[in-house]
Amino acid sequence: MQTEVEAPMAEPLRVGNGVAVSGVRKAYGDVVALDGVDLRVTAGEVVAVVGPSGCGKSTLLSLVCGLDTPDAGTVDAPEAALMPQRDGLLPWLSALDNAALALRVGGASKKEARAAAHSHFVRFGLEGFEKTRPAALSGGMRQRVAFLRTLLAGRPLLCLDEPFGALDALTRTQAQAWLAEALAKDPRTVLLVTHDVEEAVLLADRVVLLSPRPGRVMSVLDVPLARPRSRTDRAVVELRERALAALGVAP
Ligand code: ADP
Ligand code: MG
């Protein structure tokens, strides 16, 4: 059973304000990563950004998180917590201390931070692995520790950069179900980057399709489907095929 310390996550719906990206351009030297990108995420919405490798998805997240500034255009976003493309766990810290890191950075004592992080370990399937170092965790567990850390940062906006990109198909399916469940229990505004169209349709309220570099918004698909969703639902399959067609990939 979960002990109810439930620090930041137990507060009611903290979805903050939405995200508004307008006319954004970002280049690295001669490489134009993004050009003329417009994107809206309404508070509480899960928006997935899908596009081929190198089209500027990670760049877009770093702009939304305020880690970098656009060359042109504007980015308006609430405080965000970023789950980076590589899990970003510190190899010398235990799973518990990695999960608690954002709370520590936010000023909590070691004891408070550990207690708050630990209160989620059962729900995140991490019980018994508190003292384990990242290298000894499975890929799925590392992703869950990284996600818990992102969630515990207590920011209204979560920016998730290919959170399941490194997982095998089975673990990935489980991780998607578990993310959907975590967001159902603790709603946030989410910008989810993925190269997996099916993952986008399973998890998002809207799917934004980016062109090859320089990334531009090619189309936006609404996903007005009830949750939980299954990859075998007819509507999910249809939307997935529409998205693939829009990306120019034969389903
Ligand atoms: P994606 O996440 O969609 O794969 P990225 O945003 O990582 O794409 O990168 C977009 C393009 O910008 C790529 O061509 C990449 O090589 C380039 N790029 C990204 N970050 C930098 C950087 N810090 N310096 C130079 N080039 C970069
Ligand atoms: Mg990337």
Image: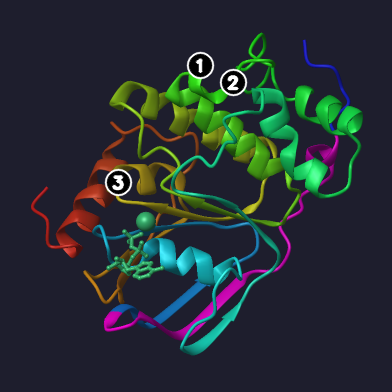
**Residue lying at the far left of the rendered structure:** 250
Residue range of the region highlighted in magenta in the rendering: 7-31
Query: Can you say whether 217 is above or below 171 in the image?
Result: below
Residue identified by numbered label 1: 136
What distance separates the C-alpha of mark 1 from that of mark 2?
Answer: 6 Å
Taking the spot 90% from the left edge, 27% from the top edge, the residue there is 111
The quarter holding residue 211 reads bottom left
- Tag 2, which secondary structure? loop
User: Does the image show residue 223?
Assistant: yes
What distance separates the C-alpha of mark 2 from that of mark 3?
Answer: 29 Å
The residue carrying mark 2 has its beta carbon less than 8 Å from ligand 2 = no
**Residue lying at the far bottom of the rendered structure:** 72
- Tag 3, which secondary structure? loop
Q: Residues within 10 Å of mark 1 (few under 14, many from 20)?
A: few
Residue identified by numbered label 3: 196
Residue 199: assigned label: none
Let me know if residue 28 is in the magenta part: yes
Query: How far across and how far down the image is residue 56, in percent?
Result: 35, 68
Query: Can you say whether 236 is above or below 223 in the image?
Result: above
Query: How far across and how far down the image is residue 138, in percent?
Result: 46, 19
* For discs 2 and 3, the disc positioned in front in the rendered view: 2
- The amino acid pointed to by label 3 is Asp
**Viewer-nearest residue: 141 or 5:** 141
Which quadrant of the figure shows ligand 2? Answer: bottom left
Query: Can you say whether 102 is above or below 38 in the image?
Result: above
Query: How far across and how far down the image is residue 221, in percent?
Result: 35, 63
Relative to 7, is 151 on the left or the right? left
